[in-house]
Amino acid sequence: MADELDLLQRWRDGNKAAGEALARAHYREIFERLRRELRGDAELAAELTQQVFEVAVSNREDIVTDFRRYLHGTARFKLW
């Protein structure tokens, strides 16, 4: 978690590579969760996963702890 908080801070400070590392660390988990919830619809899951990460990019200044939890909350919202 400390490493992730460091990456998150570096990303907020403008380090694009840190943001990419965070995305790589969580993309598959978010995609698989959405695909499960969508009963196997991989195309829609990929689209929603992209949207989840777009929201994270737009709101990165507001994410101060637990990036994973933020992503899952956003994914849950997208499913509504």
Image: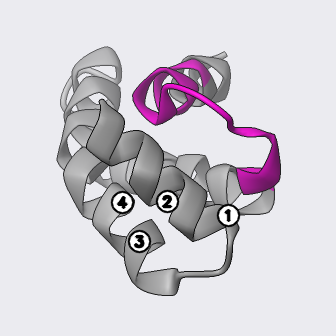
Instruction: From the viewer's side, name the closer residue of 47 and 7.
Output: 7
Q: Amino acid at mark 4?
A: Ala
- Rate crowding at label 4 as few (under 14), some (14 to 19) or many (20 or more) other CA atoms within 10 Å: some
**Label 3 with label 2: CB-CB less than 8 Å:** no
Is residue 63 inside the magenta stretch? yes
The residue pinned by badge 4 equals 23
Residue located 69% across and 38% down the image:
63
Residue placed at 47% from the left, 23% from the top? 72
Say which mark, if any, is on residue 18: 3
State the quadrant of the C terminus: top right
Q: Is residue 21 left or right of residue 59?
A: left
Q: Quadrant of residue 7?
A: bottom left
Relative placement, left or right, of 50 versus 45 is right
Which amino acid does the dot numbered 3 rest on?
A: Ala
On whether residue 52 falls in the magenta region, the answer is: no
Determine whether label 4 and label 2 are within 8 Å by CB: no
- Residue where numbered disc 2 is placed: 50
Counting residues from the N terminus, which is met first, the one under dot 4 or under dot 2? 4
Looking at numbered disc 1 in the image, what kind of residue is underneath it? Arg
Question: What residue does disc 1 label?
Answer: 12
